[in-house]
Image (cartoon, rainbow, N blue to C red):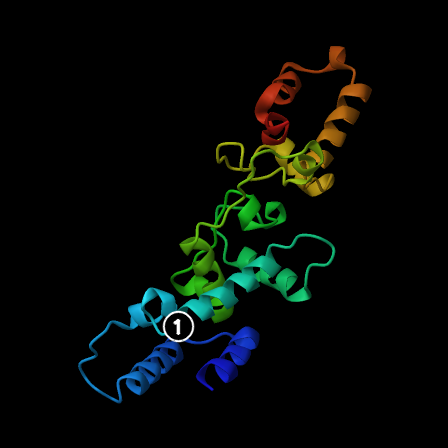
Amino acid sequence: MVGGHTQFLTKAQGMPTHIEEALTRMIRDFIWDDGINPRIALENLYHPMDKGGLNLLNIKARNEAIELTWLRSYLDLTPKRPIWAIVTDILISAAAPPGTLAIARMNMFIQKWKPSTRGPQAMILGDETLRMLKIAKKYNTNLGVIRLSTSVKAKLPSWYHLGTPPRPLTNIVTKCLLKKHKVSTVVMSRTILFKFLIFTDFSRMTHDEHRIVSGDSSTIQVL
């Protein structure tokens, strides 16, 4: 009963820490008949029987597994992505550091910015999102691949790019690309750059314009 009923609700709504601790105490008290001096640590009883345990239900581990399934669904960036994950994007973005631009933020796991998980700003996230982010941090969830294809690289965000040092998005070129041209991904940056190179008469550019084109834009440096 402790496993079946609680895990069904946890999958849908999550489980507060104090409930998790209360259920763990109930399991321990049942095993030891309310004894105050258990003879074997509960962690050992979680092991399978062939390893000396009782294959006892580990509520904490089960809850973490459920939170990891939430994280897996959240990180599904395909068109089949659930609506709740899109709403979670908005919440996480709202808790982002003040120095980052909302228009440039896409997803914390494929960019160089992290939301606040403590203090007043973290209250925006809600308990479920906070638990998901904490489990992601615990298991070091990140974009880790052996080799990215060219097509996947092109879909990565241009801003707060994982492959570049952090820098403020405050120069004129960056603001123009963000606000006027609505550039968000590397492939969009390339398209704008190629159009610029094809249609621009460089012989008529001023010294300052040459300086901007030669490297002030973080997007061009990513390319």
The type of residue carrying mark 1 is: Asn
Residue 35 screen position, x and y as percent: 21, 86
- Dot 1, crowdedness within 10 Å: few (<14), some or many (≥20)? some
Looking at this view, name the residue that lies furthest to the right.
199
**Left or right: residue 140 compared with residue 41:** right
Snapshot quadrant of residue 94: bottom right
Q: Nearer the viewer, residue 102 or 64?
A: 64
Residue 37 screen position, x and y as percent: 17, 81
Q: Nearer the viewer, residue 89 or 104?
A: 89
Count all numbered tags in the image, as a single digit: 1
Name the residue located 30 percent from the left edge and 81 percent from the top edge.
28
Residue 26 screen position, x and y as percent: 34, 85
Q: Nearer the viewer, residue 18 or 200?
A: 18
Looking at this view, name the residue that lies furthest to the left.
37
Element on which disc 1 rests? loop
Name the residue located 47 percent from the left edge and 87 percent from the top edge.
1
Looking at this view, name the residue that lies furthest to the front.
50
Snapshot quadrant of residue 183: top right
Residue 31 screen position, x and y as percent: 31, 83
Which quarter shows the C terminus? top right
Q: Is residue 53 visible?
A: yes
Vertical side of 1 occupied by 81: above or below: above
Looking at this view, name the residue that lies furthest to the top.
203
Name the residue located 46 percent from the left edge and 76 percent from the top edge.
15
Snapshot quadrant of residue 43: bottom left
Q: Is residue 126 visible?
A: no
**Left or right: residue 119 compared with residue 210:** left
Name the residue located 64 percent from the left edge and 40 percent from the top edge.
156
Label 1 sits on residue: 55
Vertical side of 173 occupied by 143: above or below: below
